Image (tube, grey):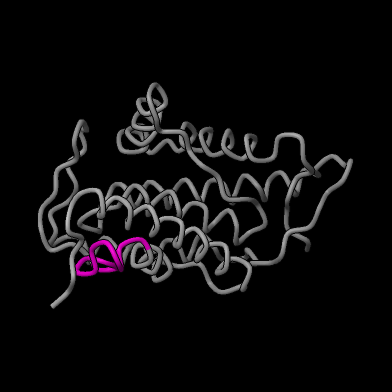
């Protein structure tokens, strides 16, 4: 029988530890040059919940869900396997031609147009994956945390840095509106802007990380 947290405080502590562990997993995976794919997304979720809620860790949900304070109704759980399969195939397609390499420092140099285009492509893929996870809601819990770490996986695998998208207080509405903009108009730009802001926060005052070709 699986030991469950004894109370809400212990649950929150184990989930917080799980997020830290998953963040380290993302960084290690990125530096290992391993492929970034949907299997890795499920591993991220497993790292978050393997102690706090092992029954759901890294597993597709089998129950319907609603999202508090959101107009988005996640697809029925019977649709999740098919949607995950589609996302898996699309992610593989989007990553064609991108090489997972160690970043290097660009010191005192302007980025070339080619480098800027590559950065924008990476950020767009990160935004797309972030949205697909929140849209499908493939897990019973922790979809937002997994989506944000999955976006970091893409950023870190392709030479940028992991970020923290601000979703507290007034930023929460911006974040939700950015996700809704993709739902309604297939427009990733507001979500990309949030990711770029996160990158600027991380990189403020230090040289820019990017891939070495």
Quarter of the image where one finds residue 6: bottom left
Reply above or below: 162 against 193: below
Q: Is 151 placed left or right of 62 in the picture?
A: right
Residue beneath the point at 18% across and 36% down: 68
Reply above or below: 195 against 86: above
User: Is residue 163 highlighted in magenta?
Assistant: no
Residue beneath the point at 62% across and 44% down: 120
Q: Is 213 placed left or right of 99 in the picture?
A: right
What secondary structure do most residues of the magenta stretch adopt? loop
- Horizontal and vertical percent for residue 212? 78, 61
- Horizontal and vertical percent for residue 49? 30, 63
- Horizontal and vertical percent for residue 126? 50, 50
Q: Is 159 placed left or right of 23 in the picture?
A: right
Reply above or below: 57 against 13: below
Residue reaching furthest to the bottom: 1
What is the number of callouts on the image? 0
Q: Is 177 placed left or right of 106 in the picture?
A: left
Residue reaching furthest to the top: 170
In the rendered view of the protein, which quadrant contains the N terminus?
Answer: bottom left
Magenta region, residue range = 48-59
Residue beneath the point at 55% across and 45% down: 163
In the rendered view of the protein, which quadrant contains the C terminus?
Answer: bottom right
Reply above or below: 173 against 22: above
Question: 189 or 157, which lies in front?
Answer: 157
- Horizontal and vertical percent for residue 31? 63, 68
């Amino acid at each position: 029988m699986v030991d469950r947290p004894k109370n809400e405080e212990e649950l929150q502590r184990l989930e917080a530890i799980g997020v830290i562990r998953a963040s380290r997993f993302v960084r290690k995976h990125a530096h290992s040059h391993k492929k970034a794919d949907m299997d890795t997304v499920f591993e991220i979720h497993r790292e978050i919940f393997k102690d706090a809620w092992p029954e759901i860790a890294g597993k597709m949900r089998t129950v319907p869900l609603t999202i508090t304070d959101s107009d988005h109704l996640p697809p029925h759980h019977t649709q999740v396997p098919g949607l995950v399969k589609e996302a898996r195939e699309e992610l593989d397609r989007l990553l064609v031609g991108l090489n997972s390499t160690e970043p290097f420092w660009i010191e005192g140099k302007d980025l070339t147009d080619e480098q800027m285009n590559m950065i924008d492509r990476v950020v767009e893929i990160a935004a797309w994956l972030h949205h697909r996870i929140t849209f499908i809601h493939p897990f019973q819990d922790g979809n937002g945390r997994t989506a944000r770490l999955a976006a970091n996986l893409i950023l870190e695998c392709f030479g940028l840095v992991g970020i923290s998208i601000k979703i507290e207080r007034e930023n929460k509405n911006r974040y939700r509106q950015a996700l809704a903009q993709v739902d309604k108009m297939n427009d990733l730009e507001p979500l990309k802007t949030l990711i770029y802001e996160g990158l600027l926060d991380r990189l403020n005052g230090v040289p820019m990380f990017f891939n070495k070709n």
